Amino acid sequence: MVEVTGMPGLWETMRQAIQLNEAIFVEIQRAPGGLFIALLVVFLAGLSESLGQSIILFVNRVSPPRFLFALVITAANHVVGYLLWSVTVWLVGFYLFARSVPFMAIASAVGLAYAPQLLAFFELTPFFGNSFSVILSLWSMTAILIAVRAGFGLETWEAIVMSGTGWLAIQLWRRTVGRPIYGLGRWLQRRAAGVPLKYTAADLPTLRRRPTWLENMDTWRKRMNQRDLRENLAQLAEKHDQPHV
């Protein structure tokens, strides 16, 4: 039996969700603002992921206003994906397992399961970014299983079957009816950025290049050193030219 102690604050809620505390997934279904908290977690998770992928915007030299707009569009697409996931899980639970649970409750639990993705900006960390991406995917999937089990009151194997069925349904939807919608989302991202969002091996020199302000600082320092050297040489020349008393 999961012990429920009440809904904590936002940061504590996200911390417990990241730690996969099942009680918080139960409590958020009962909280008056549970759905709002879930939407906020999903949006922040999408923003974190888009920040991790912002290197693509950097490579394409996107202006700051477009950069911020592109990040918001990416986070909004994350929310759309979450809503699709929530609807799919709710329909599978209702028709396959005959569980009548309010959609808002399921949506709250599923949204909170996005909490591990708040760490998605670490995915582009050098050396261990790819490994962390795999760990984060497994972490998020475990959170979804816990959310589904808590939301529908299922056994673990039932939650696995429901989550797997929901995932397959989403993949099928993306490749058929939902293809134009996802195409629209990608078009909005490109439109917001204003440049093609692509990253190739040819961009590596740009990523390895030192920032312009550092290069300018080095140039300024060299010029100052050269000027000081010229002044010192001039002073020595003046002293040498002065008549000895």
Image (spheres, rainbow, N blue to C red):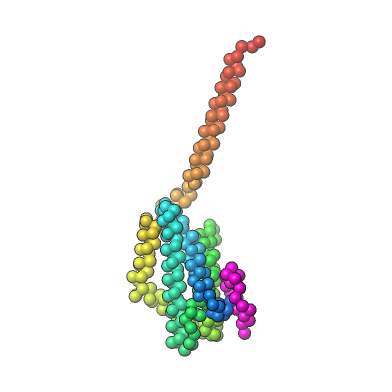
Q: Residue at 45% of width from left, 61% of height from top?
A: 71
Q: Position of residue 219 (x, y in %)?
A: 50, 37
19 sits left or right of 78 in the view = right
Q: Residue at 44% of width from left, 62% of height from top?
A: 72
Judge by depth and name the residue closer to the eye, 37 or 125: 37
Furthest toward the top, the residue is 245
Q: Residue at 43% of width from left, 55% of height from top?
A: 65
Judge by depth and name the residue closer to the eye, 102 or 161: 102
- Quarter of the figure with residue 6: bottom right
Q: Position of residue 225 (x, y in %)?
A: 55, 32
92 sits left or right of 228 in the view = left
Residue 6 belongs to the span the image colors magenta: yes
Q: Position of residue 77 (x, y in %)?
A: 42, 67
Is the N terminus in the top left, top right, bottom left or bottom right quadrant?
bottom right
Residue 123 shows in the view:
no
Furthest toward the front, the residue is 32
Is the C terminus in the top left, top right, bottom left or bottom right quadrant?
top right
Judge by depth and name the residue closer to the eye, 206 or 191: 191
Q: Note whether 11 is above or below 166 in the view shown.
A: above
Residue 57 belongs to the span the image colors magenta: no
Q: Position of residue 94 (x, y in %)?
A: 45, 86
Q: Residue at 59% of width from left, 76% of height from top?
A: 7
Region rendered in magenta: 1-23
Residue 94 shows in the view:
yes
